[in-house]
Image (cartoon, rainbow, N blue to C red):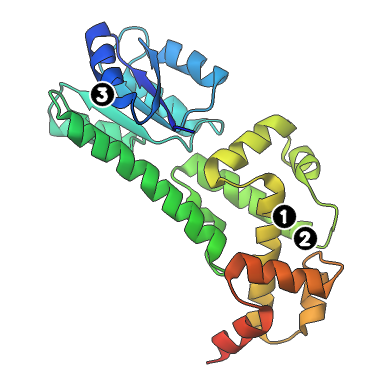
Amino acid sequence: MKPVILLVDDNEEILSFISDDLEETYEVRTATNGFDALKALEQEPVQLVITDIMMPEMDGFELCQKLKSDIHYSHIPVILLTAKNTLQSKIDGLEFGADAYIDKPFSPKHLQAQIANLLKNRDQMKAYFASSPIVHIKTMAYSKADESFLEKLNEIIHQNITNVNLDVEHLADIMNMSRPTLYRKIKSISDLTPNELINIARLKKAAELLSLGDYKIFEIAEMVGYTSQTVFGRNFQKQFGMAPTDYLNQIRV
């Protein structure tokens, strides 16, 4: 499936020009101001937003600020497009949380490269988090709202890590969020389902306990919510590419 990009500009010609250039690689949705953009985001998950700054009703700065401070959308990369080629304008954009800033007129190839780079970096960070026993969940945060969300989520999982039945229903209840909202947020920010994220959190905690050298493997398996050492070992191997005993040997070197 193609990534979905939301393009926001009050100039219909620019919307058409950029859409035509991007539609071979991406699914492009359009809006003519910030209010319409927010309505569009309510209807469909979006992987990236490109917005002009100078627009009626709600400009690009305000839209960017709203996205980066809203837990539903704070993980979405934002590229600002503007004809205001001043240093202060760029500083303002970055302070509002923009991920990139491109001056008009711009090269379509430059825009394509910026989009691809932002999406690739997100994907690499998600993969790095999932494959490494020691990388913290906060590495996937691209905004303060994301960081707070991930810290709270991680804390709740650890507080309930011995509960073998911990699932998205429990997490949603504790975090005061609806199940669909929590599911969408976790999936968008990590490419993982909530249950997959819970399992990785269990395995990362197990890696931390292994590094202490104070417990046997079967004890650690139970401490992180596994009822079977065999299943724990198999999951650890699948997630991190090594058995718990191999990880122990590695960190002892």
Write down the residue under mark 1: 157
Write down the residue under mark 3: 21
1 or 40: which is nearer to us? 1
Near mark 1 (Cα within 10 A), the count class, few <14, some 14-19 or many ≥20, is: many
Residue 171 lies, in percent from the top left, at 75, 44
- Taking the image as drawn, is residue 177 in sight? no
Q: Horizontal placement of 21 versus 158: left or right?
A: left
Quarter holding residue 42: top right
Q: Horizontal placement of 125 versus 166: left or right?
A: left
User: Taking 64 as reference, is 156 above or below it?
Assistant: below
Mark identifier at residue 51: none
Residue 89 lies, in percent from the top left, at 20, 29
Residue at image coords 61%, 81%: 247
Quarter holding residue 44: top right
Image marks 1 and 2: residues in contact by CB distance under 8 Å:
yes
246 or 52: which is nearer to us? 246
Q: Amino acid at mark 3?
A: Asp
Write down the residue under mark 2: 161
23 or 128: which is nearer to us? 23
Q: Horizontal placement of 127 versus 91: left or right?
A: right
Distance from Cα at disc 3 to Cα at disc 1? 43 Å
Residue at image coords 33%, 27%: 24
* Closer mark to the observer between disc 2 and disc 3: 3
Quarter holding residue 250: bottom right
Q: Label 2's element?
A: loop
Q: Amino acid at mark 1?
A: Ile
Q: Amino acid at mark 2?
A: Ile
Distance from Cα at disc 1 to Cα at disc 2? 6 Å
User: Taking 207 as reference, is 184 above or below it?
Assistant: above
Near mark 3 (Cα within 10 A), the count class, few <14, some 14-19 or many ≥20, is: some
